Image (spheres, grey):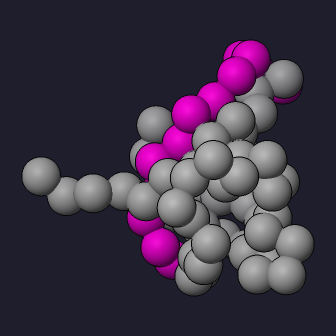
Amino acid sequence: MQATVSRYDGETFSGSVLTDTGIELPFTVHAVADTPVRHLRVGQRVRLETTGSGASLAVSKVEFATEL
């Protein structure tokens, strides 16, 4: 799933993203812990892995989006 960073705190490595379908989802340090992501900026495109669905949809991993 693709999204855009809408908020990011570089001290706590947490923030939120706006998915391409218009859903705002928060994420915590656990979503970037096993990735090279350490610095994000508002407006940056990212790729997400999620768990759950509907109201229980949650971000499990945030990675840099790459253009092919």
Q: Is residue 27 above or below residue 56?
A: below
Residue visible at 85% across and 81% down? 11
> Is residue 26 at least partly visible in the picture?
no
Q: Any magenta on residue 51?
A: yes
Residue visible at 73% across and 75% down? 8
Numbered marks: total: 0
Q: Quadrant of residue 5?
A: bottom right
- With 22 as the anchor, is 8 left or right in this view? right
Q: Nearer the viewer, residue 38 or 25?
A: 38
Residue 55 at what x, y percent from top left? 84, 25
Q: Quadrant of residue 9?
A: bottom right
Q: Nearer the viewer, residue 52 or 31?
A: 31
In the rendered structure, which segment of residues is drawn in magenta? 43-55
- With 37 as the anchor, is 47 left or right in this view? left
Residue visible at 56% across and 34% down? 49
- With 33 as the anchor, is 44 left or right in this view? left
Q: Quadrant of residue 13?
A: bottom right
> Is residue 62 at least partly visible in the picture?
yes
Residue 19 at what x, y percent from top left? 56, 48
Residue 6 at what x, y percent from top left? 66, 70
Residue 36 at what x, y percent from top left? 52, 61
Q: Is residue 43 above or below residue 31?
A: below
Residue visible at 79% across and 47% down? 30
Q: Any magenta on residue 54?
A: yes
